[in-house]
Image (spheres, coloured by chain):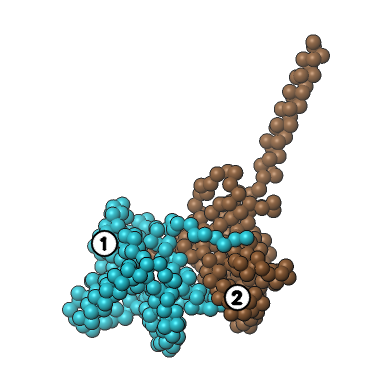
Chain colours: A brown, B cyan
Amino acid sequence: MTMLRCSRTSSALRRLGVMLLVLVAVPALAQEAPDALVKRVAQEALSIIKSDPKVQAGDQAHIRDLIEAKIAPHFDMDRMTALAAGRAYRQATPEQKKRLADEFKSLLIRTYSNALNQYRDQTLQYEPLRADPNATEVTVRTQVIRPGQTPVSIDYSMEKTPSGWKAYDVIVGGVSLVTNYRDEFTQQVREGGIDGLIKALAAKNAGTAAK
Amino acid sequence: MLLRAATLCACASLVSACAMGPTREDPFEPVNRASYKVHQVIDGRVIKPIAQAYVDYTPKPVQLAVTNFFGNIDDMFSVVNDMLQGKGDKAGNDLGRVITNTGFGVLGLIDIAGSAGIPKGNEDFGQTFGFWGIPQGPYLFIPVFGPTTVRDGSGTLIRAYASPVNFIDDTPTRYILWSLNLVDLRASALQTENLLNQAALDPYTFIRRSYLQRRQYLVYDGKPPPTKEDEE
């Protein structure tokens, strides 16, 4: 009887121990919340913009490297490309898909580095995330506050992946980047097929790089 | 007089747009593209250099005062359109801005209400028409004025006709104010334009999609109905 109670107590204790361990370990293992991630990355980027002398001197190549390292990993480029290219993407070969995603990524990085440079004196405001804790797709909302003007919203459509939350669209003032590119891509594919689109993107990237 | 005729004309086309039913957004694309080219020439040679010089050589506080002055007029129209859409809270908010800024901010030159944390609304006639369920009608690209639709353009004409600037008797003053308004608007788009040139494969398409998305978003006050995503 005593033996039994003893073993029961010890198993209860063990269970408690496991529970405690889980309680302590889970927050550490859990993924960073999407809104916290957006805030952290944006603030990191802003602090670099404000303090890095090379960025302030307008060294575009350096800015692009920083974005490639700090910001690009938080985007799901394959999904963005698939969304923007639509049907053409589904019919493309794996090699075409990869080249398309690569060129699209370069274009977005260039554009984003330009945008960051322009908004560096603005204040960013982060809205609290209202989403089901089990959601796998959320929209993180932020706002750029400009004196004397209506604030501009910047929303990030995000998805949960095994390697953390990733953005697959950015919506600035109601204008979705992916939707905008969908029109552009459709037009290029209509004119020159998927290879025509890849070529147009590559030319655009080469052209803006030369500037 | 000219403006009145134009307004009538736009209202007539607004009615015909309603009757047209569902159609592609840009049925006049070839004409619009031609006008876009004309616009680029006029803009590149005249308007943009003026706007750039204005940004470079006018003291920043003056530029801000100009933006605030025209912003205050926008706010007056926000109040009207808030009311036309039955949005009482927003109307009160925007009316508060107009009274504060006109009365205490030297005819709107200083955005006192903004500093006090009263956010700026931005309703216009095009949004009101959209709120009432009037479709946007064909997309139009007008040289100098830029992208619009039949619905939004009609709104812009009504607004231009009813603007306080239009009630100034002194003709030169009126023209100076209209020009200043245009330069202020153009100056505010200089940065966006850089981004556009960086981002777009075909700026015409990019502007069209951005404009239409933005207007849809504004008509629905930031909560547009979801569009079907074309995913795998």
Q: Residues within 10 Å of mark 1 (few under 14, many from 20)?
A: some
Q: Kindly identify which residue carries mark 1.
A: B80
Q: Residue at x 28, y 68 (%)?
A: B73
Q: Residue at x 40, y 58 (%)?
A: B220
The N terminus of chain B lies in quadrant:
bottom left
Q: Chain of mark 1?
A: B
Instruction: Tell me, yes or no, if residue A54 can be seen here.
Output: no
**Which of labels 1 and 2 is toward the front?**
2
Q: Chain of mark 2?
A: A
Q: Amino acid at mark 1?
A: Val
Instruction: Please state which of residues A27 and B106 is positioned toward the viewer in this rendering.
Output: A27
Distance from the alpha carbon under mark 1 to that under mark 2: 45 Å
Q: Residue at x 38, y 61 (%)?
A: B219
Instruction: Tell me, yes or no, if residue B125 can be seen here.
Output: yes
Q: Kindly identify which residue carries mark 2.
A: A189
Label pair 1/2, CB-CB below 8 angstroms? no
**Position in image of residue A92 (x %, y %):** 68, 69
**Position in image of residue B173 (x %, y %):** 24, 81
Q: Secondary structure at mark 2?
A: helix
Kindly give the residue lying farthest to the top in the view shown: A1
The C terminus of chain B lies in quadrant:
bottom right
